[in-house]
Image (spheres, rainbow, N blue to C red):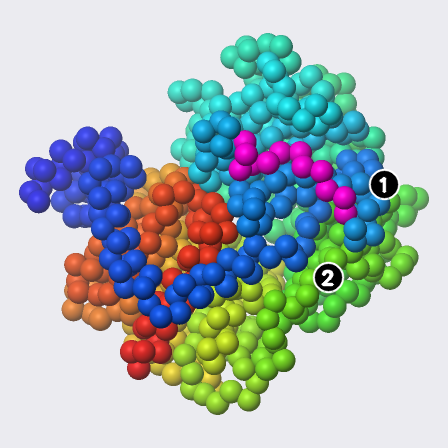
Amino acid sequence: MTRARLAALALACSLSAAAFAATDTDPWLWLEDIEGAKALAWVKAENAATDKLILNRPGFEQDRARAKAILDDDRQIADPGQVMGDTITNFWRDADHPRGIWRQSPLGAYLAGTPEWTTLIDVDALGKAEGQSWVWHGADCLAPTYTRCLVSLSPGGTDSDVVREWDRTTGRFVTDGFALPQAKSAVVWEDADTLLVATDYGEGSMTASGYPRIVKRWKRGTPLASAAVVAEGEASDVGINPIAIDDGKTRWILIARNKSFYTSDYSIRAADGAGFVPAPIPDTADLRDVIGGQAIIFLNQPADGFGEGSLVALSLADAAAGRPAKMAAVMAPTKAQAIEEVSATDNILWVKALDDVEGKLFALRRDPASGTWTQREVPLAANATVHLAGAIAKRDTIFATAETMLDPPTLYAVTDNAAPRVVQSLPAAFDAKGMTVEKRFATSKDGTKIPYFLVRKAGAKGPVPALIHAYGGFRAAQTPGYLTGQPYRAGPLGLFWVEDGNAYVLANIRGGGEYGPAWHQAALREKRQNSFDDLHAVAEDLVKTGISSKGRIAISGRSNGGVLVGAAMTQRPDLYGAVIAGSPLEDMKRYNKLLAGASWVAEYGNPDDPADWAFLSKYSPYQNVRKGVKYPPIFLYLSTKDDRVHPGHARKLAAKLQDYGNRVYYHEYLEGGHSVGADHAEDAVRAAMLHAFLQRELVERK
């Protein structure tokens, strides 16, 4: 294809001027045209080529069917949703309801482990009736009556969705009720007849990152166009969003202006109701919850004498009235701990922390007279991953799950002064008697100890093929869950792999939140190489200890993890034998110009700044693929409907690797959004495909 033809195609695709200028140096730029005929023809050809290699392999259909049966199993935790008085909701997917049903049960029956479900919305039936491929994005019902709900539905699984008012008493969408067209919106109830809405209001109303920058107050019965502006950010911000938190009988209304991915200015509705006033929350901190009028704030950086990673509190009443609001200590983690999840009931603050990447649950109470907080550890399960799953505020009860890689999830209802009570405990989905889990530590290039979890058959003799999954970014800790869901978005791939006699590893590399803010900051921007070095160290530790060997280690990562495995692949093609990259970032030269990419500049740096490009260019996977180098085969999976990470990242990397003579497996779903997979059927196919890929490349090609 001539340069003139490439330029014409770029213009027809309405690419930016910067993209147009780049055609001379990037021959694959046309693959960024998401829905373009030529690009989609390429996608279909690549999908077909991968299907030909994988779908008819012996064992594929058995894997797919087993994966779907595991994912659709009725014996799954009915996760608690919103508690609405004496009623609790749940969103449920199974074989009969692939897109899911939103349902409710009397709270007492649910707590007794014998829920009595009534369907509220059947998403599959709704989609069929309306001719839409709806994917559930949640519902927010207004306390204290919980009669009216804001239901969010995404067409095909995109981050953008439509919002429609729904009446729980009639079971119908409200005629002439509140309704927002498809957009990346943030909307909350201010009261029964008023919404605070951040959405796409037309030209100039969105940030460079593609999120709203204006919040308006929308009154019932009036057109959205007449709604009054209550807060406004800058085009250079990431976005702005309204927040509503129920605290007993008080509903606190705040607005967060997200100046960058990691900095936000908070404002609170003034005590007299006349507008919003600044809230004295450090712009690097996160508002986690409210209890007894106290805002619970997580410090990502030291503030007012309190260390990073700590929880502090301040009076919202003082803030709303314009009075000084002094921060007070709530909880300070130990060096090995990281505070990860926080949830408030009427009188107890519940905190889930990591302790050397193992979950711990704490109950905290505040003395109203002194303002001091006391804490008590609540034992759940040893060496387990713990998650807060919901709360019954008036009963001071928290729902929490606990699981390990070999022990299925158990849902507990926990109160402060009683032993945790089992609400639902799942039976084993596989025989774990012949498997073991170990927590080990590798030593990275700079001497830092990097934890990782290793699963394999008991008594296994190495070296055997190994699969390492990691993430390493955005403060997101990777904690070990039941093997039927490992790695993330790959269904029971980890289970299949271990049953084969191989090793599965979850690596806790820097960039995540496993040890608090410092663990994240150690791989931020120009320090990104630390996360790659950590992954290399874990792989090399597997070799050194005889678990696996060079060239027989696969690495897996999604989204930000795509940068990780792409960089690792280009830096150490000798070490790795296969690569799995889901919804990946790969072109760090242009990432900030594609979809939501501009919002991540605080994480990676700005490639348009020569000083930042100096360090980004050293690892950007797309730019570092070289002719004449043999790279490990890669499986790229993604979705055309991903409106967060642009499909062009994976498309261009695949094309470049193939052009240089490397093996590429490619699978792009037309739906599913960033999560890739709108239902369990698609997830099951992906699990079977990835298993076949690993077998083909690590086992059969010894």
Residues at discs 1 and 2 in contact (Cβ within 8 Å): no
Q: Given this view, does label 1 or label 2 mark the residue nearer the observer?
A: 2
Which residue occupies 81% across, 35% down? 85
- Indicate left or right for 649 with 176 as reference: left
Residue 399 at x, y percent in the picture: 76, 52
Q: Classify 10 Å Cα crowding around label 2: few (below 14), some (14-19), many (20 and above).
A: some
Which residue occupies 20% across, 40% down? 38
- Evaluate whether residue 425 shows in this view: yes
Up the image or down, 516 lies above or below 321; here it is: below
Give the number of the disc on residue 425. Answer: 2
Q: Which residue is mark 1?
A: 394
Residue 95 at x, y percent in the picture: 55, 50
**Helix, strand or loop at mark 1:** helix
Q: N-terminal of the two: label 1 or label 2?
A: 1
- Indicate left or right for 655 with 618 as reference: left
Magenta residues (range): 115-126
Give the number of the disc on residue 29. Answer: none
Residue 215 at x, y percent in the picture: 56, 23
